[in-house]
Image: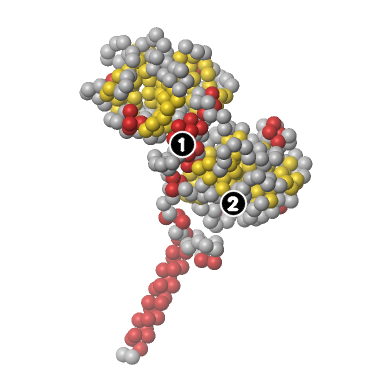
């Protein structure tokens, strides 16, 4: 009987060992491959909130111009929304190399080089991964020294710089206070000093401007000299993220007019005043160009925030949120009409969600954009029925749109495109000149 306790202890030890092996087998990672500072799969269960001031490991646009923000083994797509595991989009980052975090990333955007154009590059320790349309290119990962000779391992940041902005198609690499300009064509490396710029934890080219992120702040810099002009650093959450709560001492008008986050909706009323909505806030631009900003709830308390589309008709604002339609009479204050909200289907004859809607002056037709199609709904008759369905071939997605005396402005991301008429927009096969929303609609010059 004296052996029984020893036998029980041995059984318990074997059971624990078996359970540990089984756990490792399920995840495919024995303990010796866990990177320093990590604890198994705790990162996978992490709940990350970018609005709490995260320091991103890397930032890069994908092939469609959507920014990807990397933190640990997670990825934020776009300027708002929850994090997801990076290996859901780039599985091989985990298959070939246990993903603790991405050191640096960039999208090769050199149209003169079709072999590499629109390819994404990720750097992990001493390896570089190259993707095209989210598929790992054959032969990768490779050593950084093989693909980018002269560039060190364990990078902090990287950003592409086409010849139109750097003189030569280049990639700028950052490690500590060392900066390397890599000539893509000749593979020559030029080491530079950017004395006025802080050390970058990630770098990002967006709307032909260059941003160095350090902590949860950023500075805009000249890619050739590293010079930082203007009032920097600025808070990244004010310009590159859509957060419901901001610092009390922040300049809310400055944040909204200069934000890189796309608008949710935009319209102009009969008097020519523009209302632009983003998240929990909106900008009003009066016909004398005076700008003001406030929370959506302060002026449209029944709506709260996060509208999908807004259009103006006969001195009223029609505001669509999910499958509900809210109607306000324009004035000071705006008056919410009794009986609303009502279902969008009942009022406009079409199911949500709706991307954008607009009415051109002196017309009774509201043009509704849903996905990649546009519909016409005559507001002067009942019941209202969507007609004249047409595909939109020039844009895969529309964020907002409005119509005025000079035509239609269609907003996608941080840019808008001007079309002389609805017909021109629908039949277009190529995008017209890009215009910056922040600069040309709201006068933000940085």
The image quarter containing residue 298 is top left
Q: Is residue 306 left or right of residue 38?
A: left
> Reading the chain from its start, which is encountered first: label 2 or label 1?
2
Q: CA distance from mark 2 to mark 1?
A: 32 Å
Residue 419 visible in the snapshot: yes
Q: Nearer the viewer, residue 254 or 282?
A: 254
Check the picture and name the quadrant holding the N terminus: bottom left
Give the SS element for disc 2: loop
Tag in front: 2 or 1? 1
Image position, residue 260 (x, y; %): 51, 34
Location of mark 1 (residue): 251
Q: Which residue in the rendered view is the most extreme toward the front?
A: 249
Residue at position x 43%, y 41% from top? 249
Q: How is the structure coloured here?
A: secondary structure
Residue 369 visible in the snapshot: no
Residue at position x 67%, y 32% from top? 111
Q: Is residue 344 left or right of residue 220?
A: left
Image position, residue 103 (x, y; %): 59, 51
Q: Which disc, if any, is residue 103?
A: 2
Image position, residue 52 (x, y; %): 44, 48
């Amino acid at each position: 009987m004296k052996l029984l306790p020893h036998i029980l202890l041995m059984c318990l030890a074997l059971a624990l060992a078996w359970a540990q092996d089984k756990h490792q087998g399920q995840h495919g990672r024995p303990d010796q491959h866990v990177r320093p500072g990590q604890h198994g799969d705790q990162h996978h269960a992490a709940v990350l909130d970018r609005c709490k001031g995260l320091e991103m490991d890397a930032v890069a646009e994908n092939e469609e111009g959507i920014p990807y923000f990397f933190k640990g083994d997670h990825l934020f797509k776009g300027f708002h929304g929850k994090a997801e595991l990076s290996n859901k989009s780039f599985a091989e980052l985990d298959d070939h190399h246990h993903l603790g975090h991405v050191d640096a990333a960039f999208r090769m955007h050199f149209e003169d080089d079709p072999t590499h154009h629109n390819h994404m590059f990720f750097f992990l320790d001493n390896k570089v991964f190259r993707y095209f349309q989210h598929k790992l290119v054959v032969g990768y990962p490779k050593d950084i020294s093989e693909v980018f000779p002269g560039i060190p391992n364990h990078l902090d940041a990287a950003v592409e710089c086409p010849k139109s902005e750097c003189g030569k198609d280049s990639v700028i690499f950052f490690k500590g206070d060392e900066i390397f300009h890599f000539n893509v064509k000749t593979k020559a490396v030029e080491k530079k000093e950017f004395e006025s710029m802080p050390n970058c934890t990630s770098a990002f080219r967006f709307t032909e401007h260059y941003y160095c992120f350090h902590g949860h702040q950023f500075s805009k810099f000249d890619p050739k000299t590293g010079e930082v002009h203007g009032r920097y650093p600025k808070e990244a959450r004010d310009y590159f993220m859509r957060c419901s709560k901001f610092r009390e001492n922040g300049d809310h008008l400055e944040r909204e007019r200069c934000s890189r986050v796309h608008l949710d909706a935009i319209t102009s009323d009969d008097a020519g005043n523009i209302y632009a909505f983003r998240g929990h806030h909106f900008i009003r631009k009066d016909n004398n160009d005076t700008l003001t900003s406030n929370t959506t709830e302060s002026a449209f308390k029944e709506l709260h925030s996060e509208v999908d589309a807004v259009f103006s008709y006969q001195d009223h604002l029609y505001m669509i949120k999910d499958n509900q339609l809210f109607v306000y009479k324009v004035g000071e204050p705006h008056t919410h009409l009794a009986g609303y909200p009502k279902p969008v289907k009942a009022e406009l004859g079409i199911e949500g969600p709706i991307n954008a809607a607009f009415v051109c002056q002196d017309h009774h037709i509201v043009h509704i954009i849903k996905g990649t199609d546009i519909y016409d709904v005559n507001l002067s008759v009942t019941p209202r029925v969507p007609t004249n369905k047409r595909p939109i071939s020039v844009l895969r997605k529309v964020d907002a749109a409005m119509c005025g005396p000079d035509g239609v402005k269609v907003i996608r991301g941080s840019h808008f495109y001007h079309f002389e008429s609805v017909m021109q927009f629908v039949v277009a096969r190529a995008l017209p000149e890009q215009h910056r929303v922040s600069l040309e609609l709201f006068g933000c010059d940085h």
